[in-house]
Amino acid sequence: MRLFAQFVSYLLHPMLMPTYLLLLVYSTDTYLQLATPANLHLVVTLLVFISSCLLPGFGIILLQRNGLIKSLQMETREERRIPFLITAIFYFLTFYLLRQVQLPSLVPLLLLGATFALVLTMLINLKWKISAHMVGIGGVIGAIIGLSMRLFVDYRLIIMILIIVAGLIGSSRMLLNAHSPAQIYFGFGVGISSQLLLFLLL
């Protein structure tokens, strides 16, 4: 079970969530898919993957090799500060790059929401460790709910599946003794509320 929990933690890592979210958006028949030229779908998704996952991941590996963090799991609050800051910077740069491409305004907003959620996580982490995995999946669910309200699309089935996935992630993190139930629930709340707040305000 621990091996499966580790597999889930890696497969559904928070730095992969922006890419998964974009893949989900482009796989559904909505305005966002139709308003983006088909030849840009893959380009935009690869851009998001490189700038929100590969580059910050490479930076975190460099931190570990230089002894600034003990492990890539970043088990303590202190270890998470610099990696969170690096990842937030890359998330914002991704948002900025997407703004330069002729895309529907809601697409860059997804990355702005992820940046906002990560900044909140970073600030909370100064005093209390919460689950970044749950912030990530909560952000995806919040974004899908926000899109359903803005585009008048029925995403209920997708949302139900994502909630099951969130339960799987939360259970895996607790099985690995990475977080307490309170840290799991609070992380999920931060993720979902961050995206919803931006969709309501912008």
Image (tube, grey):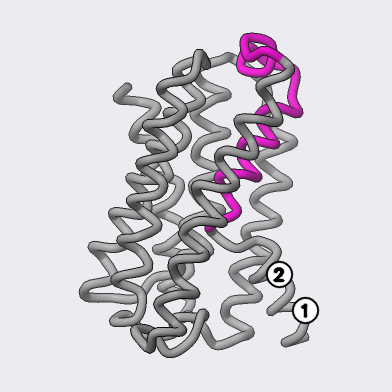
Q: Up-down: is 168 above or below 119? A: below
Instruction: Report which residue position mark 1 lands on.
Output: 4
Which range is magenta? Answer: 15-37
Q: Position of residue 133 (x, y in %)?
A: 53, 64
Q: Mark 2 and 1 residues: CB-CB less than 8 Å, in contact?
A: yes
Label 2 element class: helix
SS state under label 1: helix
Query: Is residue 12 within the magenta segment?
Result: no
Direction from residue 97 to residue 89 in the image, left or right? left
Q: Residues within 10 Å of mark 1 (few under 14, many from 20)?
A: few
Q: Can you tell which mark lies on residue 8? A: 2
Which is nearer the eye, 43 or 176?
Answer: 43
- Looking at the image, which is closer to me, 133 or 101? 101
Residue 34 in picture, x, y percent from top left: 69, 11
In the rendered image, residue 9, in percent from the top left (x then y), is placed at 64, 71
Q: Residues within 10 Å of mark 2 (few under 14, many from 20)?
A: some
Quadrant of residue 54 in the image?
Answer: bottom right
Counting every numbered tag in the picture gives: 2
Q: Residue at x 55, y 44 (%)?
A: 18
Instruction: Give the quadrant of the C terminus.
Output: top left
Residue visible at 30% across and 61% down? Answer: 85
Q: Is residue 33 magenta?
A: yes
Asked if 50 appears above or below 42 in the picture, the reply is below
Q: Which is more toward the observer, 28 or 174?
A: 28
Q: Residue at x 50, y 13 (%)?
A: 102
Quadrant of the frame with the N terminus: bottom right
Identity of the residue drawn at 65% across and 61% down: 12
The residues tagged by marks 2 and 1 sit, at their Cα atoms, a distance apart of 6 Å
Q: Is residue 194 above or below residue 170?
A: above
Q: Amino acid at mark 1?
A: Phe
Identity of the amino acid at label 2?
A: Val
